[in-house]
Amino acid sequence: MAITLFQQGEHKCLSFTDLVTGDGVQANQFLIVDGAEAALLDPGGDLTYTPLSIEIGKHIKANQLTYVFASHQDPDIIASLPRWLMHTQCKVVTSKLWSRFLPHLASGFVTGKMATSVGGRIVAIPDEGMDIALGQSVIKAVPAHFLHSAGNFHFYDQKARILFSGDMGASMVDSPPVQGVQDFNAHIPLMRGFHQRYMANNRACQLWVERVSRLDIHMLVPQHGSAFVGKAQVQQFLDWIYDLPCGTDLMG
């Protein structure tokens, strides 16, 4: 079932939080629609492809899917790549570090004439990020390098003022509440272990906080778990992660 995060005129942001079943880690997928164009964020792998394609089909037609955004290269992010390439005309937007690795996932497209078409449908984001036009709006690819992946980007919807933050802000829950985090302090134990293991170090976190603090963020929505809703709660998370020792800080 889709959860509407934002809707204004022809621009809307939808979240899908309950499509992973079985042994997979809970993951959120997102759809941004602006007029006749749409972008799907971190669509996942085989566990999510069929239910996700059914759900987004209730909101857009296949030819409206202009982009698939991949924050990084993990299976729960983009393992379903060949299916989206086969069934839509979308382009896949990802870090330049992973733009030549993703074709390895598309085994049905790596021989003969199709080899060039895969490359032609991948948009490589430079390290400094870029702006991506979607309908009448702009989605910003915001650098988040070493925050789980060496080449990593978050996506900021300027119109909705939502930062889709990938693994940053993730929490380990089976079913995130629709209304988002209710008690930040009570939520910390659901985040701490994940961030300490998966984020490279505190320096990378601090650089990210300094960068995203320049954006007007009203909602921060991670790929796993609950969203942070409202500027005050977003700031609570930024303050918390700014001071968190993690990754190489904890190696001994």
Image (tube, rainbow, N blue to C red):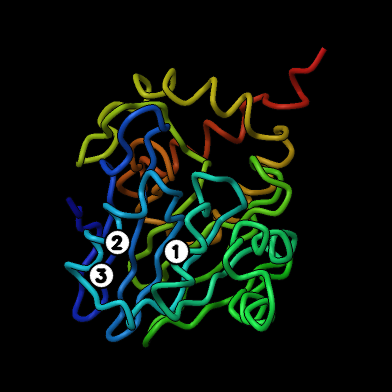
Q: Which amino acid does label 2 sit on?
A: Ser
Residue that mark 1 sits on: 83
The answer to which of marks 1 and 2 sits earlier in the sequence is 2
Q: Which amino acid does label 3 sit on?
A: Lys
Residue that mark 2 sits on: 53
Q: What element carries label 3?
A: strand
Residue at the far right: name it.
252
Q: Residues within 10 Å of mark 1 (few under 14, many from 20)?
A: some
The residues bearing labels 2 and 3 have C-alpha atoms spaced at a distance of 18 Å
Residue that mark 3 sits on: 12
Q: Nearer the viewer, residue 143 or 212?
A: 143
User: Residue at point 26% right, 52% down?
Assistant: 51
User: Residue at point 37% right, 24% down?
Assistant: 187
Q: Nearer the viewer, residue 247 or 50?
A: 50
Q: Nearer the viewer, mark 1 or mark 3?
A: 1
Is 113 placed left or right of 48 in the picture?
A: right
